[in-house]
């Protein structure tokens, strides 16, 4: 659900998928129900999300641990997610998973900083918000 005209969708999502040989699902337009049903059907192990998509998942009444049982990692970008959204997503996932939040802009192509991949088993009471610059920055 990340647009390819945005650096997060193009470089981070599509570029990583090509680099790693990952299965990638492209949806022709934004449709919240189609997005949620695609997660149900394809059972992704990794989710590339932005805060509005986190809200969509968090607020979906019939969407929870069963639909997210395959998730091992969630990458968040394009805007700060904040503690409330992150905690709600963690409650929905309901198990240990890796969480990565990044900051960047198109002019930086695309990432300036991101946190390390943190396992939420160790982050239950605190949300990691410190962003570390990548090497050579």
Image (spheres, rainbow, N blue to C red):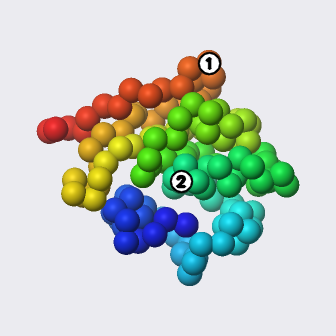
Q: Is residue 71 left or right of residue 19?
A: right
Q: Is residue 7 left or right of residue 46?
A: left
Answer few, some or many: residues within 10 Å of disc 2's Cα (few below 14, many 20 plus, some between 14 and 19).
Answer: many
Residue at position x 60%, y 55% in the image = 53
> Residue reaching furthest right?
62
Q: Are marks 2 and 1 in contact (CB under 8 Å)?
A: no
Q: Position of residue 23 (x, y in %)?
A: 53, 68
Q: Which residue is mark 2?
A: 49
Q: Which mark is residue 78?
A: none
Q: Measure the alpha-carbon separation of dots 2 and 1.
A: 22 Å
Residue 132, image quadrant: top left
Q: Which residue is mark 1?
A: 125
Q: Position of residue 73 (x, y in %)?
A: 55, 45
* Front position in the image: 114 or 60: 60
Residue at position x 46%, y 69% in the image = 3
Lower position in the chain sequence, tag 2 or tag 1: 2
Q: Position of residue 22 (x, y in %)?
A: 48, 65
Q: Is residue 14 visible?
A: no
The vertical placement of 132 against 43, above or below, is above
Q: Quadrant of the C terminus?
A: top left
Q: Is residue 20 left or right of residue 91?
A: left
């Amino acid at each position: 659900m990340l647009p390819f005209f945005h650096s997060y969708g193009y470089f981070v999502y599509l570029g990583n998928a090509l680099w790693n040989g990952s299965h990638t699902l492209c949806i022709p337009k934004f449709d919240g129900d189609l997005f949620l049903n695609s997660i149900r059907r394809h059972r992704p192990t990794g989710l590339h999300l932005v805060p509005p998509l986190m809200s969509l998942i968090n607020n979906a009444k019939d969407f929870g641990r069963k639909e997210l049982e395959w998730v091992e990692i969630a990458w968040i970008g394009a805007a700060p997610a904040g503690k409330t959204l992150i905690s709600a997503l963690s409650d929905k996932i309901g198990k240990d998973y890796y969480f990565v939040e990044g900051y960047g802009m198109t002019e930086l192509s695309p990432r300036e900083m991101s946190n390390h991949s943190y396992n939420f088993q160790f982050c239950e009471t605190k949300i990691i918000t410190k962003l570390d610059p990548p090497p050579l920055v």
